[in-house]
Amino acid sequence: MIEDNLKLVKKKIADAAARAGRDGEEVTLVAVSKTKPEEDIMALYKAGHRDFGENYIQELRTKHDDLPEDIRWHMIGHLQRNKVKYIASYVYMIHSVDSLALAETIEKEAAKHDRVIPVLIEVNVAGEDTKFGVAPSEAEDLVRAISALPHVKVRGFMTSAPYVEDPEEDRIFFERLRHLSVDTAEKKIDNVTVDVLSMGMSNDYEVAVEEGSTMVRVGTAIFGERDYTK
Ligand SMILES: *Cc1c(COP(=O)(O)O)cnc(C)c1O
C-alpha cells in the first residue's frame, strides 16, 4: 500500500536526520506523482499528505484542476518558458530554474496574479551532459540577477545526483550543494532566503538527508515503478 510506503519513507528520513543530529521535521517530503493516477494522490491526501511533485505541465494542470485546492504542487521538471503561464496562479514552488530568461518569464506571470513565486536554482553539481541546471560556478551570479525580480523569490538550490548503484557515491555531490548553499546564504543578498536544499530521490534520499537536504523528492519508493508507455 502506498500509505505504508509513505510511512516507511518518513521513518527513514527521520532516522537519517537523527544520524546527522537533525530533526526529521526539518525535511519536507515531496511525493513525486508524475505518471501516477489521481487515486494514488488522493490516497496520500487522505492520509494527510499535501506536498506533491510533478514534471509535466499538462499533467500538472489536469491534476490541479481535479484535485483539492490545498495540495502544494511542486514543479520539479524542466520548464519551458511558454508553459509558465499555465501554472503561475497556483504552483507552490518551482525547483528547476536554471536561467535568467526563465526567471523573467516567471516574474511576468507571477506579477499578473499578484503573487510571489518561490523558486530554487537547479544546479548540475556533477556536470553531467544529460542534465539541466547551471554549473556551480554560475549559481551565485544567477541568484543575484534573479534577486532583482520582485515576484520571484529565491529560496535555495536543487539538484538531481547521478544515478548510481551505491548512493554513497552521490554523497560528495550533496555535500557540494550544501556548501554552495551555505556560501550563498552568507552573502546576504536582498530578496533571497537560502533555506531550502532540494536533493535526494528514491535511491539516495537517506544520504541526501544526512548531508543536509531539507526537501526530498521521492517517487518510486512511494508509488512504485513508473510506466511511461501508458
Ligand atoms: C522523477 C523525479 C524524481 C523522483 O524520482 P524517483 O527515483 O522515482 O524517486 C525526483 N526529482 C526529479 C527532478 C524527477 O524528475
Image (spheres, helix red, strand yellow):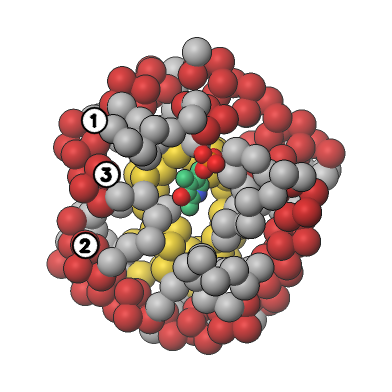
Task: Name the amino acid type tagged 2.
Answer: Lys
Circle 2 Cα neighbour tier, 10 Å, few/some/many (<14 / 14–19 / ≥20): some
Give the labeled residue for mark 2.
Answer: 83
Picture disc at residue 215: none
Q: CA distance from mark 1 to mark 3?
A: 10 Å
Give the labeled residue for mark 1.
Answer: 67
> Residue at 45% of width from left, 58% of height from top?
95
Q: Nearer the viewer, residue 33 or 43?
A: 33
Q: CA distance from mark 3 to mark 2?
A: 11 Å
Give the labeled residue for mark 3.
Answer: 60
> Residue at 45% of width from left, 39% of height from top?
32
Q: Nearer the viewer, residue 128 or 134?
A: 128
Q: First in sequence, mark 1 or 3: give its number.
A: 3
CB atoms at circles 1 and 2 under 8 Å apart? no
- Residue 105: image x %, image y %? 25, 74
Residue 137 seen from this side: yes
Q: CA distance from mark 1 to mark 2?
A: 20 Å
